[in-house]
Amino acid sequence: MPKPVKSEALKSKAVRAKPASLHIDYLDIDGRQVPVTAMHNPRAHRIIVRVDLAAGSVQVTSPSKRGMAKALEFALEQRQWIADRLEHVAPPVPFVNGAHIPYRGREHLIRHVSRRRAALENAGPVWRRPASETLGRPEICITGEAEFIQRRVTDWLKARAREDLNETALAYADTFDVRPARITMRDQTSRWGSCSTTRSLSFSWRLIMAPPHVLDYVAAHEVAHLRHMNHGARFWSLVESAIPNYESAKRWLEINGPGLHRYGIDPFGASDLDD
């Protein structure tokens, strides 16, 4: 990937401190309003502009709070550089009424309704209607105030992902005769799952949007690491023993996986993690 653009001058002594979001704005790139988050990070040595290709957003990091205005000006100067990288990025698809999103590999329509049907009075604020009921595309229905649709759909998808991945990972753990110490859900753009040396498994909740066989593959892959903390021949042999056609799932993720990050995206990173 291209290296982030850096300014020539601004430097500051590195200190132990976490970066903090200080300013949110939009940058007009060829008529497209691109979210820009300006961050102050004392550990940075210069102004850095990064383009999040998954979110279609820009992050600007400044080593000094007093340099925030200059950091935003620097991002403005790099509009063509940013535009070149965003040229082939599909726009984000927020979770709003009428949006079409994938769920377990099949396109669903988000529908905001005024109230639940009588048969669902004891259900939560989000539920699924299969195609057999809608006589067309399946739906994810949400009740309540419209401004809560984004959060409620996100929470619902995360809950479904947690259910599926917990069940699937534990099933493969029994098959491989291993036991994870912990299973968590996250939203990282760099990986779909991970296995730590402490036997903790972590998965991207966005796998609930992929076809079931893809979720199965990622679960088996990470559980197999509890036996082999590498990608050697014995590791792949173990994965293949559980999923003989794992290559098709692997290819699906390589081709379609990055696109899953544009759904329900919060351009300012308000909901990056979920445990």
Image (cartoon, rainbow, N blue to C red):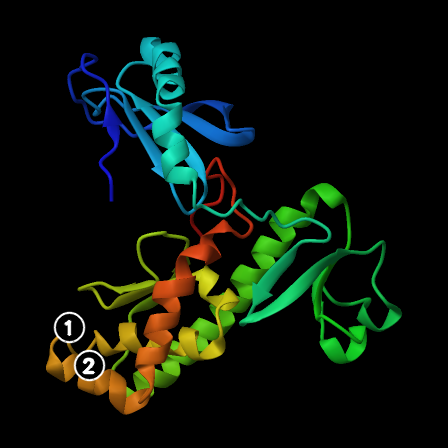
Q: Residue furthest top?
A: 66
Name the residue located 36 percent from the left edge and 52 percent from the top edge. 188
> Which residue is drawn at the image coordinates 36% and 79% (left, top)?
248
The answer to whether 218 is drawn above or below residue 125 in the figure is below
Return the disc, 1 or 2, that comes first in the chain's sequence: 1
- Against 93, residue 201 (above or below) is below
CA–CA distance between discs 1 and 2?
7 Å
Which picture quadrant has residue 80?
top left
* Badge 2 element: helix
Q: Is residue 43 left or right of residue 233?
A: right
Relative vertical location of residue 250 with respect to residue 23 in this rendering, above or below: below
Answer with left or right where residue 3 lies relative to residue 115.
Answer: left
Circles 1 and 2, Cβ within 8 Å, touching? The answer is: yes
Q: Which mark is residue 231?
A: 1
Disc 2 marks which amino acid? Answer: Trp
Residue 20 visible within the image = no
Q: How far across and down, in percent of the image, does residue 65 sit?
A: 34, 13
Residue 49 in the image: x percent, y percent? 31, 27
Residue 79: assigned label: none
The quadrant of the rendering that contains the N terminus is top left
Specify the amino acid type for callout 1.
His
Numbered badge on residue 236: 2
- In this rendered view, identify the residue nearer to me: 175 or 31: 31
As drawn, is 150 to the left or to the right of 206?
Answer: right
| Callout 1 secondary element | loop
Q: Position of residue 100 (x, y in %)?
A: 65, 58
